[in-house]
């Protein structure tokens, strides 16, 4: 039998040394996932409010859902869970979140913070779900995903991960700032002035403008694309401007282009003698302008 070459013995020894900690780590990881303990905290509180309620949220970690509920009350439901390899570690991790709620007359304020957690849980999730009267003003700061549904009010939103509004009437001077996240507005009606902004994510608007003099202003980030879908006709004059992007519009809107040295602009009357205004600006992103399908 020929002797085993020296390089082969060295390589085999090296692989054996490397394989042992990798195998041990895999076994420990598998064992930890099997033996993980989950701790959960859930609190539900109800507050009586009058005819003009206001909800204020300042939420750092939880995903947030705000939706229409019963008139005359605001229901705050907070749920937080964390998993770790010991019950004590899981309980310690889940209790790092701090939720404070204040109630004064028609206003409910919820603030969520979290201490720096030196114990990294295997899994962690948190959700804040709030039911409010359908006619409620909102002032929300949310670092997680935010969903608002079936509400009517003056809205001020500062988002981060992703912001979605469905079946919402935006009154007065409403602002929706998605931060770096995507902003999606589905079946949204503008009554007053609505300003929608995102620094990095796309902006998708599908909805309408209420009768009267209203304004929809959309400001997209450096590489954000914008999609707008409106019924035809819509009582508004639209002006679209972009530095290096392009407009892709249904021919029914009859946009007219104006090419400048730094900015390309398109304008169109979306109905005869429009009284409202729609302004869209992007940097490098493209704009899609569609007509909603007739039902």
Image (spheres, grey):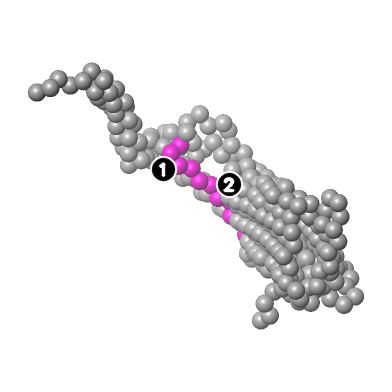
For numbered disc 2, what is the local secondary structure? loop
Q: Decide which of tag 1 and tag 2 comes sooner along the chain.
A: 1
In percent of width and height, residue 227 lies at 69, 62
Residue in the foreground of this view, choosing between 207 and 5: 5
Residue 173 magenta: no
Left-right relation of 16 to 124:
left
How far separated are the C-alphas under marks 1 and 2?
17 Å
Name the residue at 41% across, 37% down: 84
Specify whether residue 27 is in view. yes
Name the residue at 66% across, 81% down: 295
Q: Which residues are magenta?
A: 121-133
Question: Neighbour class for label 2 at 10 Å: few (<14), some, many (≥20)?
Answer: many
In percent of width and height, residue 108 lies at 70, 51
Residue 70 quadrant: bottom right
Name the residue at 62% across, 39% down: 113
Residue 239 quadrant: bottom right
Residue in the foreground of this view, choosing between 197 and 271: 271
Image height of 292 relative to 43, above or below: below
Residue 62: mark: 2
Which quadrant holds the N terminus? top left
Q: Main secondary structure of the magenta part?
A: strand
Q: Can you identify the residue that label 1 sits on?
A: 38
């Amino acid at each position: 039998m020929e002797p085993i070459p020296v390089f082969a013995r060295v390589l085999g020894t090296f692989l054996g040394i490397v394989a042992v900690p990798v195998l041990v780590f895999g076994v420990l990881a598998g064992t930890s996932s099997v033996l993980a303990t989950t701790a959960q905290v859930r609190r539900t509180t109800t507050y009586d409010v009058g005819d003009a309620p206001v909800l204020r949220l300042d939420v750092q970690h939880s995903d947030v859902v705000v939706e229409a509920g019963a008139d005359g009350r605001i229901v705050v439901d907070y749920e937080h869970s964390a998993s770790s390899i010991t019950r004590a570690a899981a309980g310690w991790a889940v209790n790092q979140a701090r939720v404070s709620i204040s109630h004064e007359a028609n206003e409910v304020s919820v603030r969520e913070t979290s201490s720096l957690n030196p114990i990294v849980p295997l899994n962690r999730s948190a959700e804040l779900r709030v039911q409010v009267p359908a006619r409620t003003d909102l002032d929300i700061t949310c670092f997680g995903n935010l969903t608002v549904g079936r509400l009517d009010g003056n809205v001020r939103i500062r988002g981060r991960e992703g912001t979605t509004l469905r079946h919402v009437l935006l009154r007065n001077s409403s602002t929706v700032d998605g931060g770096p996240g995507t902003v999606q507005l589905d079946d949204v009606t503008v009554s007053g002035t609505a300003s929608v902004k995102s620094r990095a994510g796309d902006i998708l608007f599908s909805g309408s403008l209420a009768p009267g003099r209203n304004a929809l202003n959309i400001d997209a980030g450096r590489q954000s694309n914008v999609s707008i879908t409106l019924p035809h006709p819509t009582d508004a004059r639209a002006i679209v401007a972009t530095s290096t992007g392009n407009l892709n519009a249904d021919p029914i809107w009859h946009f007219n282009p104006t090419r400048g040295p730094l900015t390309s602009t398109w304008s169109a009357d979306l109905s005869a003698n429009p009284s409202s205004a729609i302004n869209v600006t992007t940097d490098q992103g493209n704009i899609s302008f569609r007509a909603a399908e007739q039902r």
